[in-house]
Image (cartoon, helix red, strand yellow):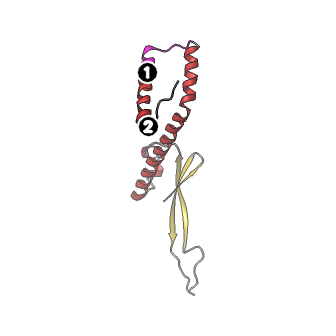
Amino acid sequence: MQIKVRGNKVQLLRSEYTTARRDDNGNLIRGTGRCTQKLLGSFDRLTEKPDEVPEEIKGKLMEEEALQLQDWIEEAVKERKQIEREKALRTLSENMQSAILAVEDGVLLEDDEAQEIYKSWSAFQTALRKAGHKRGKK
């Protein structure tokens, strides 16, 4: 089975081979001896779990295809999460600058929100040190 991403949809295609046949004169019958693709269905590209694939599509899948689809979805979710994490890291400094301006402008936080920020900041500093990044001078 082939899995193709087309825009915001994922298409599942099954390749089926039609055995070559000959007529009474020994000539190949037109349209036989070919591989054709059959669209089993399509679903949303951002699907997070195999359970979210429509039942009508899952019902068409052979056991091996269902396992292939499950592996593909799991890998796609891992890739998306990795991209999201990298984006969060790359934009963190900019977001922190905006947060600093918000606090300086008088935006109020609840105490528990402020404590979560302190905890997260401390954990982030630890992660930076463990990754080998040294603290620069102010």
Q: Is residue 4 left or right of residue 130?
A: right
- Vertical order, 76 against 65 (above or below): above
Q: Quadrant of residue 39?
A: bottom right
Picture coordinates of residue 10 (x, y %)?
54, 50
Q: Which residues are magenta?
A: 106-115
Viewer-nearest of discs 1 and 2: 2
Q: Which residue is under mark 1?
A: 118
Picture coordinates of residue 95 (x, y %)?
56, 27
Closer-to-camera residue (31/8)? 8
Q: What amino acid is at disc 1?
A: Tyr
Q: Residues within 10 Å of mark 1 (few under 14, many from 20)?
A: few
Picture coordinates of residue 127 (x, y %)?
42, 33
SS state under label 2: loop
- How many circles with numbers are drawn on the protein? 2
For the point 57% across and 17% down, which residue is it?
Answer: 102
SS state under label 1: helix
Q: Quadrant of residue 35?
A: bottom right
Mark drawn on residue 4:
none
Q: Is residue 99 left or right of residue 52?
A: right
Q: Which residue is under mark 2?
A: 132
For the point 51% across and 42% down, which residue is it?
Answer: 46
For the point 45% across and 52% down, which residue is it?
Answer: 69
Question: Along the polypeptide, which appears first: circle 1 or circle 2?
Answer: 1
Q: What amino acid is at disc 2?
A: Gly
- Residue 114 is a magenta residue: yes
For the point 51% across and 39% down, which residue is it?
Answer: 86
- Vertical order, 21 against 98 (above or below): below
